[in-house]
Amino acid sequence: MSTTFTLDTGTSRAHPVPEPVRRLTVPGIAKRKGGEPVVMLTAYTARMAQLLDKHCDMLLVGDSLGQVIYGLDTTVKVTLEMMIAHGAAVVRGSYHSVVVVDMPFGSYEASPQQAFENAARVMKETGAAGVKLEGGTAMAETINFLSRRGIPVVAHVGLTPQAVNALGGYGARGRSAEEAATILADAEAVAAAGAFALVVEGVVEPLARRITETVKCPTIGIGASAACDGQVLVVDDMLGMFERVPRFVERFDDLAVRIDTAAATFAAAVRERRFPTEKQLYL
Ligand code: KIV
């Protein structure tokens, strides 16, 4: 995919426009079961979406933005307004990937009707192709309700961070036979309800493999299994923006260190009056 640039005369910034501009589709992702792995990263801003877009099949505007962007302690405090603002930015910055926006805690659990009203707002106000929501069997009716009414849904089972208060932490799930059976039943229920893809997070590997073999939609793993039909990571984790590296994360760069070095170099240049130079001045 080649890239051309258009100039936004309002901001004088160059926006990359990849040619040909052809976005992947929800049915296209659904067909990837057992085929080419689905590449998904989270994105929260237009610029990051521009950078990630051509490498990904799906961009997830995850409610992890609560911690990553807003410094919140959990995703429980994330609002629909935050998700809509960041979802719209990611759609504006992308041309190729299927963009999915997380439904935040409290915006969908009460009833299928509540979920439809809020998910429809997300779709209208962001332009995203679908929504993601957490939960298993209890959410199956809602997933069916949404997907039969034109709202494609990615389901999310296993470790579901919005339930951190009920789960008591972020430890891997499915270690006991009983818990593994419940999570497998959750996966089967949401897939049968019409989810077009299923995020499987933080479960023991054999369970993630079993879920992938069992359900008809593609599974997208995070802390799950290499056997999943795709993989997702929080982009800031993948870029090395945080000191804490959970077991399931691979850092593909060390951006925090590089930003620290750049900021220190800038600060020294300012303090020593080496910046700006003539090159940056209007003479
Ligand atoms: O919110 C998020 O970023 C997510 C991914 C970790 C799957 O749900």
Image: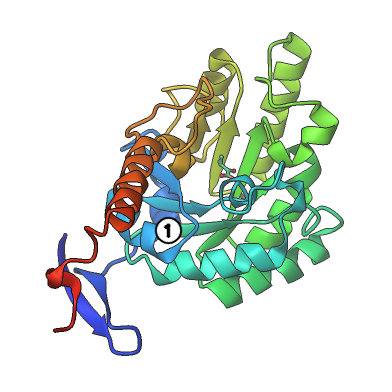
Q: Nearer the viewer, residue 104 or 225?
A: 104
Q: Where does label 1 land, which residue?
A: 98
| Colour basis | rainbow
Q: Name the kind of residue labelled 1 in the image.
A: Val
Task: Left or right? Give the position of 60 relative to 65.
Answer: left
Evaluate whether residue 175 shows in this view.
yes
Q: Is residue 226 above or below residue 239?
A: above
Residue located at (35% from left, 51% from top):
267
Residue 1 falls in image quadrant? bottom left
* Quarter, ligand 1: top right
> Residue 161 at x, y = what percent?
70, 37
Residue 192: quadrant of the picture: top right
Q: Name the residue at 81% across, 52% down.
A: 109
**Toward the viewer: 273 or 209?**
273
Q: Can you say whether 160 is above or below 266 in the image?
A: above
**Left or right of 83, for residue 283:** left
Q: Can residue 56 be seen from the camera position used here?
A: no
Find numbered disc 1 in the image and state the secondary structure of the residue it sits on.
Answer: strand
